[in-house]
Image (spheres, rainbow, N blue to C red):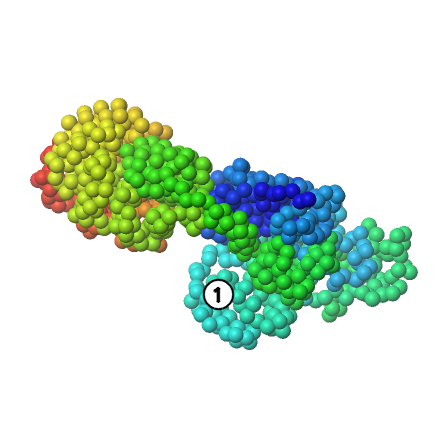
Amino acid sequence: MIPARTRHTVAIVGAGAAGTLTAIQLCETATRRRTPLDLVLVDPAPEAGRGTAYATSDPRHRLNVPAGGMSCYPDDPGHFTRWLCRHGEPTVTGADFATRYRFGAYLADTLGQAIVRAQGVVGVRRLRVRAESCTDAPDGRVELHLADGGRVTADSAVLATGPAGSPGDWAPPALRASARFVAAPWAPGALDGPRADGADVLLVGTGLTAVDLALTLDRPGRTVHAVSRSGLLPQPHALTPAGTMPAPEDLGSSLAELRRAVYRHISRAVRTHGDWRPALDSLRPHTARLWRSLTPDERAQFLKEEGARWNTHRHRMAPATAESLTRRRTARRLRVYAGRIVGVGVGVGEGAGVVGAGDEGAAARSGPGGVPAHFRPGGILTVSLSGGRRIRAGWVVDCTGPGPRLDDPLWRSLFGSGAAVPGPLGMGVATGDGRLLDARGRAERPLFTLGAPRRGELWETTAIPEIRVQAAALAQELLAPLTRPARAARRPRRRPVDAHGLALSTHAEAAAAYRTGLDRVLKVRAAAEDAFGRAVTLDPGFALGHAALALVGHECGAEVDVPRALADAQRSARERADERERSFVDVVTRRIHGDDGDGALLRHLEAYPADALALATAVPTIAFSGINDLDDAYALRLVERTSPVYDGHWFPTSLLAFLRQEEGRYGEAGELAHRALAAEPAAGHAVHALAHVHYESGAHATGRDWLDGWISGQGRGAVHRAHFSWHVALHELALDDTAAVRKRWFAQLAPGRVTGVRALVDSGSLLWRARLSGSWRGRIPAADVLGTVAQEVVERPATAFTALHAAVALAAAGDLAALRRLRDHAAGADEVQREIIVPLCESFAALVEERFHDAARGLDALLPGLRKVGGSAAQREVVEETLLYALVAGGRCDAARRLLDARLDRQHAPRDRRMLAGLPV
């Protein structure tokens, strides 16, 4: 009798890249869906993730795809790059080529983290043993028979065995029997012989394997020879990518038409970009479709006529690798030939005999064990190539790459039973969307594969960008039958809600953590990201929790892996979210990518006015930069229109207070702020509004004293406590109390007390303003502020608001090179950065170079459109104060006087009166 099963079991045979990527996707997808699963990973290798490709520890062996293309996740392309940055390579970029060993470590680490996060949902067993055969089991399952006599019964099995080994059929039998022939160079200890002596080496094959071994086996006094039928080495990647281009819409319906279209496409790329690579790269997403469109005869013709050329251009070397090979070829330590091996003979002197591939006398001349004497250790081989060339070498290494047929015990058992058949053109295995087809062309067994075994079906299927997509699709297919019936059978139950009555697609514990995070955002309290992080830890499939994390990371500078959180939000929204939650995920996605985020946010609020997090995001305040081009009147209408659904809640009241002060209605704004604070004394938005009321109305002494008291009381837990200290310092600056400004800066705003974006926005701008007005004598520690902020944030900021303050801090530090890098980034960023930040950087650079007239002209032109960067008028005022400095330094005292008069009309400030009095008449 078959025992009842409560958990589905998936076995993965192979723990290299393909198996690891599949295991990661299964763990994470099952965890998001809360689908119980047992996962068995079968592979004798000591460590998951490395396989053959990534086990090499030679630092000269680099990936042949830039780091930006090697993420485990198709929807998070920067994941590997960020991993490298967190693991000892902080300056790496997506265009760099990491070592293969580091990528293996990344795969193993990512799998380990996925397993840890899946605990309680997914049980993972790792069997370090080889699977040798597979048979049918009851209930439509399969049974794997292991080399140690054990068995694994699984509901489905994924055969992630990687590429087939080289068949070695090009080598004469006598050579294959020689101790001087290395048939599997990546096997442990296979290269011990060539490493131990200095004899020349012949590599058979000139692809990427030969490239790696040419570097590994190179040494002074040795010549490494390499031969292949084409004699072509892989092309190098460009040092600087030339750009991108779309693939042609019509590539034809036959091989001849396809060939003509591709060559025309390459010619256009050369004319447009000066490089053929963008053309070939644009075809990559379409390669499988194009391959399938060809007839079997056309595919065979392509392999024969274009295969070598395609491989050398499609599978390229890292630029550093190409440079190393060029140096060795120039020094004649690496020699490359085109030809075939036609014979192997004794190389003990001139006139040595040659043993051909079909020499029947070889066995007669054999020594002990049937191995020819001249092939035993210590001999030198003479290899004859087509065309008459002879090469004397101590070692011959097979670098011809994978063969067409999968040929290990497991696959032999499947082919023998008819459960699997060879794929098109005898390459790999026949599959239908990754599922094995049997001898009758049917996919009856729960057997799946991905990567290299699908080569006959897809052609291009051996690289990480293709395998990760297949792994994600496979996880969806394997888990789909488990989640859909469970949902259908589950009785509807009441969902938990947020503080404003909106339903949440999660369980009660995660909802409680989310409500805590939302409350902290609305109050501007610390650790909102911790609460949101706890929500998604409790429920990894909670889309709104992931979206909130991504939002506070992107807009508030919280310690969040924003791309990862966003990808998790998108995955979860597809699997389990209501319409409102999917809309919010879309809003966050668009804001982060700069794709009509403002429009999407406004549309979302029209449909869901009670979404407090969306409302907080829309209105420019202390927490968020708000919507670009959102004028005061529209923002006011937005808050007034949504306020009724909050039924007198203090949060919209605090937003109204802030907007009223932006309108200059300071009395009404003050009343609203006090009303909100009476209901919630920790309401940070109301405090912020009141701080602006005091500043803009010139009540500097009152504002200083009230805000200082709040900071030492309710403000102790404020996430933006430094910003409130900045407001107090602005009052002290306006009062011309230079000693107080310096004291507050060192006590509450200096690096160490404030770091990251907050230091950039508050500490850096305060230093600059104090320096411009003469309130800070001597060196300003702007470089210390910049030292607390990631270089990427400073030079490649995500928002125009952050970019403005990065430009301020870089100008204060006098870093012209970084200012220009920031300008270049802004030129390729969103519209506001292009329109505002680019000329701002140029004006600041002119100021640093003491071209005061150019600086003043540029800054003056920017003032009317400056509010597009977001933030408050008090924050944007730093540009006006820089303009004032440029006017005075450039001798334009009349213009400076007019600007000071206008400022004094807005508010009383002893500092401005002192500066006005100091202007020459």
Q: Residue at x 70, y 56 (%)?
A: 414
Q: Is residue 359 left or right of residue 548?
A: right
Marks counted in the figure total 1
Single out the residue that lies furthest toward the right.
Answer: 364
Q: Is residue 350 left or right of residue 413?
A: right
Q: Residue at x 57, y 71 (%)?
A: 294
Residue 59 seen in the current view? no
Q: Is residue 609 above or below residue 414?
A: above
The amino acid type, in three-letter code, at marker 1 is Ala
Give how far across and how far down residue 394 sits, in percent.
Answer: 77, 54
Give how far across and how far down residue 614 sits, in percent.
Answer: 29, 44
Q: Nearer the viewer, residue 455 or 429?
A: 429
Q: Is residue 129 above or below residue 594?
A: above
Q: Quadrant of the C terminus?
A: top left
Residue 272 seen in the current view? yes
Which quadrant of the structure image shows residue 315? bottom right
Q: Is residue 171 above or below residue 112?
A: below
Q: Quadrant of the N terminus?
A: top right
Q: Is residue 598 above or below residue 548?
A: below
Q: Nearer the viewer, residue 330 or 769?
A: 769
Q: Is residue 753 left or right of residue 227?
A: left
From the image, tell me which residue sits under label 1: 279
Q: Residue at x 62, y 40 (%)?
A: 125
Q: Residue at x 53, y 36 (%)?
A: 120
Give how far across and how far down residue 742 sits, in percent.
Answer: 25, 27
Estimate how packed mark 1 is, as few (under 14), some (14 to 19) or many (20 or more) residues with alpha carbons within 10 Å.
Answer: many
